[in-house]
Image (tube, rainbow, N blue to C red):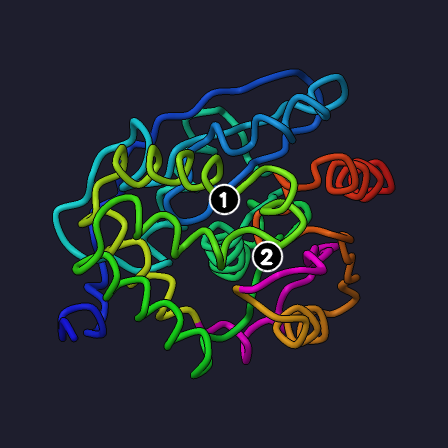
């Protein structure tokens, strides 16, 4: 075991200027990607909303074309980066949609700067890293040191995608996509993002969230269970829980139509 992988975070990392783009026009919706993903991960979501909303997509630090970090950082640091995206887009606030790591960043943004968040949609999310989640993420870190690219991507994909997607698309095709993302990001950057995610614990603070919130969960989720989704939704006042059938952790690409329908309906109600 690499002891650095389970060490404490390095608070107060400098804010990084992240690459972003705005698609469409209307009320702003900010999309925050998960670990290893880039703004291209929203290519099945943002286009479905661009006719009504201004969709802001960006690459987190350590992903895509945004800068790579020089040391470990916290989710609060990533939330500060995200606030910087709003600043550069000229937005005082936005509806915020986060997936996985992005959903944890969204929670920190809402708790630390509630005036910047109009609503929350938390997809494939969790409130606190428990022993199961910690062990799973530590396993990903260990794999990142020991497995070649193809085995690393295939092993992670078994967690990230539901069985319906694996059966319909084939593991080889899914693994190729994961290999491309992992190689583009780099393993050190992947590890820094996962270590930041491992430290997530907002459960006792979530009662302070006062914006409309929905928690979206894939029926075949293998990363965060229904227990994690219920725990998160129960901790946020008034939050609703939406289950996406026949989809896993990456439900935005596995089952984009029901995810987009739930997101559009939620935003239009507001």
Q: CA distance from mark 2 to mark 1?
A: 21 Å
Circle 2 residues within 10 Å: few <14, some 14–19, many ≥20: many
Quarter of the image that includes the N terminus: bottom left
> Mark number for residue 124?
2
- Tell me: residue 214, above or below residue 92: below
Mark 1 secondary-structure assignment: helix
User: Residue 115, image x and y in percent?
Assistant: 58, 49
Q: Quadrant of residue 134?
A: bottom left
> Mark number for residue 115?
none
User: Residue 257, image x and y in percent?
Assistant: 76, 35
Give the magenta part as a residue range. Answer: 201-222
Using the image as rendered, state which of residue 55 and residue 110 is in the foreground. Answer: 55
User: Residue 239, image x and y in percent?
Assistant: 76, 63
Q: Residue at x 17, y 59 (%)?
A: 145
Mark 2 secondary-structure assignment: loop
Give the residue number, with chain letter if any, for mark 1: 171
- Tell me: residue 136, above or below residue 74: below
Mark yes or no: residue 29 visible.
yes
Report whether 33 appears left or right of 12.
Answer: right
Q: How many marks?
A: 2
Mark yes or no: residue 113 visible.
no
Which of pointers 2 and 1 indicates the residue nearer the eye?
A: 1
Q: Residue at x 20, y 68 (%)?
A: 5
Using the image as rendered, state which of residue 70 and residue 166 is in the foreground. Answer: 166
Q: Earlier in the sequence, mark 2 or mark 1?
A: 2
């Amino acid at each position: 075991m690499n002891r650095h992988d389970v060490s404490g975070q390095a608070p107060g990392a400098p804010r990084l200027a992240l690459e972003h783009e705005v698609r469409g026009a209307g009320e702003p919706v900010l999309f925050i990607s998960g670990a290893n993903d880039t703004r291209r991960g929203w290519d099945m979501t943002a286009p479905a909303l661009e006719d009504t909303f201004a969709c802001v997509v960006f690459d987190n630090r350590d992903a895509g074309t945004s800068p790579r970090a020089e040391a470990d950082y916290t989710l609060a640091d990533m939330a500060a980066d995200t606030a910087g995206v709003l600043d550069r887009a000229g937005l005082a606030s936005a509806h915020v949609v986060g997936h996985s790591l992005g959903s944890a960043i969204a929670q920190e943004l809402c708790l630390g700067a509630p005036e910047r968040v109009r609503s929350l949609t938390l997809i494939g999310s969790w409130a606190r890293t428990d022993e199961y989640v910690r062990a799973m993420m530590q396993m990903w870190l260990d794999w990142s040191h020991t497995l070649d690219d193809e085995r690393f991507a295939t092993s992670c994909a078994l967690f990230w995608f539901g069985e319906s997607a694996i059966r319909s698309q084939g593991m080889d095709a899914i693994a190729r996509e994961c290999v491309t993302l992992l190689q583009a990001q780099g393993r050190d950057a992947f590890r820094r993002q996962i270590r930041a995610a491992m430290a997530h614990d907002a459960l006792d603070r979530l009662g302070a969230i006062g914006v409309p919130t929905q928690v979206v969960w894939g029926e075949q989720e293998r990363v965060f269970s229904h227990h994690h989704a219920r725990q998160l939704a129960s901790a946020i006042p008034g939050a609703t829980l939406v289950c996406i059938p026949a989809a896993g952790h990456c439900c935005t690409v596995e089952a984009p139509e029901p995810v987009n329908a739930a997101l559009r309906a939620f935003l239009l109600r507001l």
